[in-house]
Each structure stands twice: as C-alpha cells, then as structure tokens.
C-alpha cells in the first residue's frame, strides 16, 4: 500500500556520521510504522525501498559528507511493507569547531507530478544499475542533468516547483 504525507506534515530525523538514527519525530514513526525504540541507533537505510537507485544515495552521501545540503525525492519502505514518497532536504550538522557530527533530514509531501517524472528516471537508473552497477545509474542521471544544463539540486527543486 502506498501511504501519503499530508500537506504541512514534516518528517524529521537526525543521524550520526555513520548514518545511525539518533532522533526521529512522531510523524517519522507514524509513516514508517516503527516505534522510537525500533529506530534509534539503527542504520537509516533500514527504510530504503528497493525502487530507489543506489546512485541517488551515493550522490546524497557525497553531497552531505562534503558539507553541502542536498534535495531528493525518495521512496521509503515501512516496517509492514508499505511505502511512501517524500521530498527530502538533508544537511550536515556541525559541532562548535566546524566538524561534521551528523546529518539532519526534513521530508515533506512531494509534488505528485514530480513523482511521476522521478519514477521513470529511477526505473531507468535501476535498470542501468542491474547491468553496470552504481556507476551506470550515476551515468543515466549525469547524462540527464547535462542535457538539461542543471546541477542535481536545481533539477530536483525544479520538479518540486
């Protein structure tokens, strides 16, 4: 079953630098069908849906580990096998000395027309990854961005509108 965020809902989570969950809000737990106890200390990728290209997550990690924020459309899986799409913004968190100590993510309801466009792109990326690994999925995305003359964040934000 596909679940939907309501307009005005925000899913919030924090992780350490290894991607282990250190904080979740109530909406995260409700959408994911997990209790706080089941989430804290676990790898954030426990909610990774099989329809998400690995290349998108590699790009996301490359951005935030280098200190940049990133936007993405993500489909997540729930504890009970359901799924939900989000428009995500992920940013690094810093300590007082400027060191990255974790990551902060806020997700909200995605533009439905953006999801239709992204589904097709993600399927093409997944097909490429099956034959040529993450680098093949990355090439599909890079070729599209070059064709559009946009960087990744510009492309994603243009779809969200």
Image (cartoon, rainbow, N blue to C red):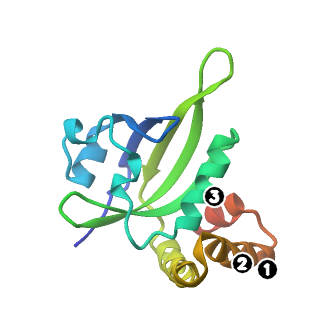
- Answer whether residue 160 is visible to the viewer in this image: no
Which corner quadrant of the image does residue 149 belong to?
bottom right
Q: Which mark, residue 59? A: 3
Residue depicted at x 60% and y 19%:
95
Q: Confirm or deny contact between disc 3 and disc 1 (CB under 8 A).
A: no
Binning the other alpha carbons within 10 Å of mark 1 as few (below 14), some (14 to 19) or many (20 upward) gives few
| Comes first in the chain, label 3 or label 2 | 3
Above or below 129: residue 71 = above
Mark in the foreground, 3 or 1: 3
Give the structural element (helix, strand or loop) at label 1: helix
Mark in the foreground, 3 or 2: 3
Residue depicted at x 59% and y 54%:
60
Instruction: Name the residue carrying label 2.
Output: 144
Give the structural element (helix, strand or loop) at label 2: helix
Q: Confirm or deny contact between disc 2 and disc 1 (CB under 8 A).
A: yes
Instruction: Name the residue carrying label 1.
Output: 147
Most extreme residue toward the front is: 132
Is residue 153 shown left or right of residue 160? Answer: right
- For the C terminus, the image quarter is bottom right
| Comes first in the chain, label 3 or label 1 | 3
Residue 137, percent from left and from top: 61, 75
Is residue 41 shown left or right of residue 88? Answer: left
Binning the other alpha carbons within 10 Å of mark 3 as few (below 14), some (14 to 19) or many (20 upward) gives some
Above or below 47: residue 41 = above
Q: Confirm or deny contact between disc 3 and disc 2 (CB under 8 A).
A: no
């Amino acid at each position: 079953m596909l679940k939907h965020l309501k307009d005005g809902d925000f899913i919030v989570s924090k992780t350490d630098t290894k991607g282990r969950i250190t904080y979740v809000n109530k909406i995260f737990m409700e959408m994911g069908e997990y209790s706080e106890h089941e989430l804290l200390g676990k790898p954030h990728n426990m909610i990774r849906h099989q329809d998400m290209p690995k290349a998108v997550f590699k790009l996301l990690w490359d951005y935030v580990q280098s200190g940049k924020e990133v936007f993405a459309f993500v489909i997540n899986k729930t504890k009970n096998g359901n799924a939900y799409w989000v428009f995500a913004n992920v940013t690094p968190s810093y300590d007082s000395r400027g060191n990255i100590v974790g990551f902060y993510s806020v997700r909200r309801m995605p533009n439905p027309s953006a999801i239709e466009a992204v589904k097709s792109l993600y399927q093409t990326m997944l097909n490429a990854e099956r034959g040529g690994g993450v680098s093949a999925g990355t090439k599909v995305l890079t070729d599209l961005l070059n064709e559009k003359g946009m960087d990744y964040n510009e492309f994603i934000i243009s779809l969200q509108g």
